Amino acid sequence: MKQLSRAFSYFSKFELALWVASVVAITAAFCLFDGSQYLTLAASLIGVTSLIFNAKGNPFGQFLMVVFSLFYGYISFTYDYFGEMMTYLGMTMPMAAFALVSWLRHPYRGKKSEVEVNRLEKKEIVLMSLLTLAVTVAFYFILRHFHTANLLPSTLSVTTSFAAVYLTFRRSPYFAVLYAMNDVVLIVLWILASRENTAYVSVTVCFAAFLLNDAYGFYNWKRMERQQKAAPPDKS
């Protein structure tokens, strides 16, 4: 009971409310529009739970993101969204694993539950932009070769995903902004898929919940950044 109480006290009332509302919305959409693909429901619940931990700068969120990527890669494969499948299995999942190691190696003053926020220099931002452009061009032709459904938004999803995972690995608050942009692209993609199969409405609702969580994640990381900068020097 004490462990459960500590777990709940770790999150603010707003964070708990956001997580509960996300879980309820995802589950309701699953019951109304799907009701059979339990893997989709499991992936959505794991994903939204990972985001609330990521918003706290907790490495456990990156572990959950690895699990989510496995599930989501398979779901994308079922609708021929090969870009999503390759992005999550070939990029997001391994980068989440690298981010997990990076976050564990950079705890804020020894706190395993909070990562030290990092600030990127201009040179690295330029490098990231060039890498993102190269990945985008390469994946456009790869996805076109595999006759990926909805090619342009699928390519844009790769662009935002790559930038997001890079910033996550580098512990920048702006990873949440790029993930929020990716969420918007994915909402469009799965709305298009839902026109042919209403079961995918639940996936659309999932990424709408992700969008809200990523918006909060950016806000909380900026708050963490201010607090860490304002804290007195560590004398240990």
Image (cartoon, grey):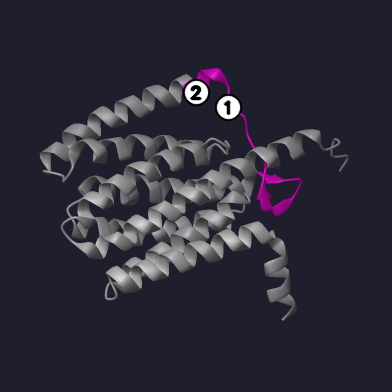
Give coordinates of residue 31: x percent, y percent: 34, 74
Classify 191 as above or below 24.
Answer: above
The verdict on residue 116 being magenta is yes
The verdict on residue 16 being magenta is no
Which stretch did the figure color magenta?
106-125
Q: Quadrant of residue 32?
A: bottom left
Image check: 225 left or right of 69? Answer: right
Q: Amino acid at mark 1?
A: Leu
Q: CA distance from mark 2 to mark 1?
A: 7 Å
Classify 120 as above or below 190.
Answer: above
Label 2's element? Answer: helix
Q: Is residue 87 visible in this depiction of the protein? A: no
Give coordinates of residue 89: x percent, y percent: 32, 52
Give coordinates of residue 17: x percent, y percent: 60, 62
Classify 231 as above or below 216.
Answer: above
Q: Residue at 44%, 22% (x, y): give it.
A: 127
Quadrant for the N terminus, please: bottom right
Q: Amino acid at mark 2?
A: Ile
Q: Residue at 62%, 29% (x, y): give it.
A: 119
